[in-house]
Amino acid sequence: MLPVYRINWLKARARRDRWREEVSLVRHEMLWTTLWFQYQKEIWETRALQSTEPGKEAYASKQVELWSDFTKKAGLMFQGKQMECI
């Protein structure tokens, strides 16, 4: 095999490997994003239950709705694309 072809083959293989790694990272990031949204929702649910003032409870409830909406939208957007880790 000529050295030119060998170099081109090695470069192409390296590009393929980098692409596979990037796809793996993006899939994991989708999973991490969804889990982060769920975690934030749970934190605000706890704060809503622990709050004693009506204003703080209303704000915490609004945050629960916000993070719940983020979780649902991320689940729909990432459906069938993320890693099946969990």
Image (tube, rainbow, N blue to C red):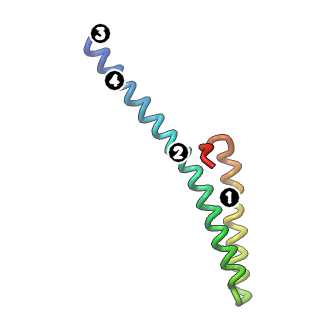
Q: Which residue is mark 2?
A: 26
- How crowded pointer 4 is (Cα within 10 Å; few <14, some 14-19, many 20+) is rated as few
Residue type at mark 1 is Thr
Q: Which residue is mark 3?
A: 1
Q: Position of residue 47 (x, y in %)?
A: 66, 79
Q: Position of residue 7 (x, y in %)?
A: 29, 20
Residue type at mark 3 is Met
Which SS class for mark 2?
Answer: helix
Q: Which residue is mark 1?
A: 71
Distance of label 4 from label 1 (alpha carbons) = 41 Å
Query: Counting residues from the N terminus, which is met first, the one under dot 2 or under dot 1?
Result: 2
Residue type at mark 4 is Leu
Residue type at mark 2 is Val
**Point 51% across, 41% down: residue:** 24
- How crowded pointer 2 is (Cα within 10 Å; few <14, some 14-19, many 20+) is rated as some
**Point 71% across, 82% down: residue:** 57
Relative horizontal placement of residue 76, taking residue 26 as reference (left or right): right
Q: Quadrant of the N terminus?
A: top left
